[in-house]
Amino acid sequence: MGEDPLEFIDKVSRVLNFVGVTPVEKADLAAYQLKDVALMWFSQWKEARPVKAGPMEWERFKNGSLDKFLPLEMRV
């Protein structure tokens, strides 16, 4: 993610809450904004999920992204 991961998550969340999309649409639209290493990570992470896990939803996307790109001790 070329910016602060928490700032990215917050910005995407605010915009998509305003638009009123579903949790699945929210995760898809946020993933669309990823670049370079973050996009590669997301693609591999999504592919590795079990088929029965269903579509990726916002909370799982948000938590997975923060776990990968923002160490727990840096979160507010």
Image (cartoon, helix red, strand yellow):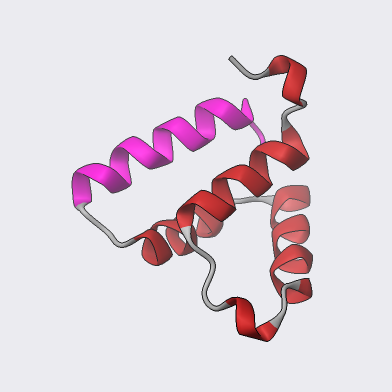
Q: Residue at x 44, y 31 (%)?
A: 10
For the magenta stretch, what is the residue range? 1-19
Q: Which quadrant is home to the N terminus?
A: top right
Taking the image as shown, residue 12 lies to the left or right of residue 45, namely left
Vertical placement of 29 versus 1: above or below? below
- Quadrant of res 12: top left
Q: Is residue 6 magenta?
A: yes
Taking the image as shown, residue 73 lies to the left or right of residue 28, namely right
Q: Residue at x 61, y 44 (%)?
A: 63
Q: Residue at x 76, y 16 (%)?
A: 73
Residue 1 shows up from this direction? no
Q: Which quadrant is home to the C terminus?
A: top right
Residue 48 on image: x %, y %? 79, 73
Vertical placement of 4 versus 25: above or below? above
Q: Nearer the viewer, residue 66 or 53?
A: 53
Q: Residue at x 63, y 84 (%)?
A: 52
Q: Is residue 34 magenta?
A: no
Q: Nearer the viewer, residue 2 or 12?
A: 12
From this viewpoint, which residue is outermost toward the front? 52
Residue 24 on image: x %, y %? 42, 66
Residue 51 shows up from this direction? yes
- Quadrant of res 25: bottom left
Vertical placement of 45 versus 1: above or below? below
How many marks on residues? Answer: 0
Q: Nearer the viewer, residue 12 or 71?
A: 71
Residue 19 on image: x %, y %? 21, 50
The secondary structure that dominates the magenta segment is: helix
